[in-house]
Image (cartoon, rainbow, N blue to C red):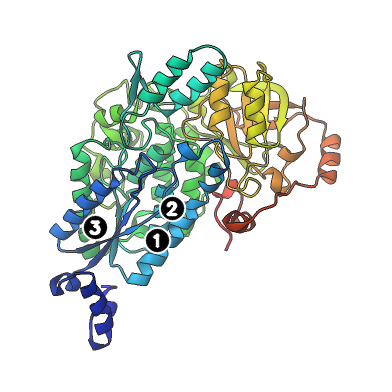
Amino acid sequence: MVSDSIKNGAQNAPHRALYHALGMTEEEIKRPMVGIVSSYNEIVPGHMNIDKIVEAVRIGVAMAGGTPVVFPAIAVCDGIAMGHKGMKYSLVTRDLIADSTEAMALAHGFDALVMVPNCDKNVPGLLMAAARLNIPAVFVSGGPMLAGHVDGAKTSFSSISEAVGQYNAGKISLEKLKEYECKTCPTCGSCSGMYTANSMNCLTEALGMGLKGNGTIPAVYSARIELAKHAGMTVMELLRNDIRPRDIMTEKAFHNALTVDMALGCSTNSMLHLPAIAHECGIEINLDIANNISAVTPNLCHLAPAGRTYIEELDEAGGVYAVMNELSKKNLLNTDCMTVTGKTVGENIKDCVNLNTEVIRPIDNPYSETGGIAVLRGNLAPDGSVVKRSAVAPEMLVHQGPARVFECEEDAQSAINAGKIHPGDVVVIRYEGPKGGPGMREMLNPTSAIMGMGLGGSVALITDGRFSGATRGACIGHVSPEAADGGMIGVVKEGDIISINIPENKLELLVDKAELDKRMADFVPKTKELSGYLKRYSALVSSGAKGAILNK
């Protein structure tokens, strides 16, 4: 064991003295040291229950013969950070989480780890750390929130965001907005739709790094506590059998994750996080792979915001494994991949049948024959851009319209709220990319305002920033190269015609080539006065097309 070099022998008596200072017995010191990475805090609703999950993991580890030791990881609530400078600090925490977990694990010589994440950047950050450290590890998330209820219909975080747009448009009263405010998020847990947190927790199952139900068992269910105990026991089996994260997160496993991503209709943020996790495994994922997989993968689920079903219903229908079972019927998965269960994907999913064909469409009756995410290219995004195709109105899959250009999210939001955006417009928000933001802010507020004002079927939004998983509509993000890196999005002018063709994966600025060449020759990207961590991040971060990883 790794910890033996720290614990054993006369020379390590000082180390043992410090273990005794922690209250450890001789028996505990002799056992494998299992780090439990707790993402508990009191500001993120998806993390306020993690103390209970961690305690259950502790019990599981101890039952299986290990010594559990808890240490923390940070997490930001993207919902609370939304719409102000706080959102600049969301994506950047992914790398802080990976780096700090690496530091803690190696400094203290842990033999294995149980990762307890839940919300948006916390999950990929810990998956990156697991890949980097490559010691036995298993994941158990805090679980999803139950849906809220307003007027007899289920609601989620996107409901309250769009309700703000409805209020600003005079469609609902302040009293109704208050009702949404009080009823939309009724429990602890990650927001109840297929947003980024739940997307990444479901994809953790698909990768093989989490047990069945990791992505779908509601946070408030006792089954979540049982799952956590089993995670603690499972990590000890992984340690005994020397099964490590890079044995599980292979190239084939990432192809499985992308396939499940397309079938579920996950958040566009998965197109940032999966490449970043793969990079830590020494695997490069080109965005074109996503389109290749999407072309043959049917979209089986329309979970919020794309539809009116929620994660709790996906769980009742059989969860991620039931979706994977459907996909296996057309040989769309690599079923021989190893998982944390010690069994292959095929062994895990063989008996997991679809229990509700309204929530999980059968493979021969999908919502669409192609996947939920599309990567668009063209002169406006030669390195790629990303759209959640499953959440786009049919009439907006192909669209041309005049550009309405804004240099930041706040300016666009003000224009939308003031009624200055009209049917047919293409809103362009630039200098919000990984480098230019910095931090690649989510644009949930402007996209929700567009939907709430009834413009979702006639207005598109394009940005070098990114979107919340709660975003729906013709919203195209991750435009690369970004404006701050000299991308063509930086030279779009008010009134330029932009062409969007999602079925053909095209995004074009319809301006004469000679004129574009002149604009690009004269283009000097804007810069911002930065300080602190954001200054360092901006100097190191790569393109969104590469997962916004930090250049070494």
Q: Please report the residue visible at 24 percent of the width from the left and 79 percent of the height from the top.
A: 17
> Reading the chain from its start, which is encountered first: label 1 or label 2?
1
Q: Please report the residue visible at 16 percent of the width from the left and 69 percent of the height from the top.
A: 28
- Badge 3 marks a residue whose secondary structure is helix
Which quadrant is the N terminus positioned in? bottom left
Q: Is residue 275 above or below residue 304?
A: below
Viewer can see residue 334: no
Q: Look at the numbered discs 3 and 2 and tell me whether their residues touch, using CB distance below 8 Å.
A: no
- 140 lies left or right of 20: right
Q: Look at the numbered discs 1 and 3 and tell me whether their residues touch, using CB distance below 8 Å.
A: no
- Badge 2 marks a residue whose secondary structure is helix
Q: Picture coordinates of residue 42 (x, y %)?
A: 35, 45
Q: Please report the residue visible at 53 percent of the width from the left and 23 percent of the height from the top.
A: 392
The image's mark for residue 125 is: 2
Three-letter code, disc 1: Thr
Q: Which residue is mark 1?
A: 101
> Reading the chain from its start, which is encountered first: label 3 or label 2?
2
Three-letter code, disc 2: Gly
Q: Which residue is mark 3?
A: 235
In space, the residues marked 1 and 2 are separated at their CA atoms by 9 Å
Q: Please report the residue visible at 70 percent of the width from the left and 49 percent of the height from the top.
A: 528
Residue mark closest to the camera, 3 vs 2: 2
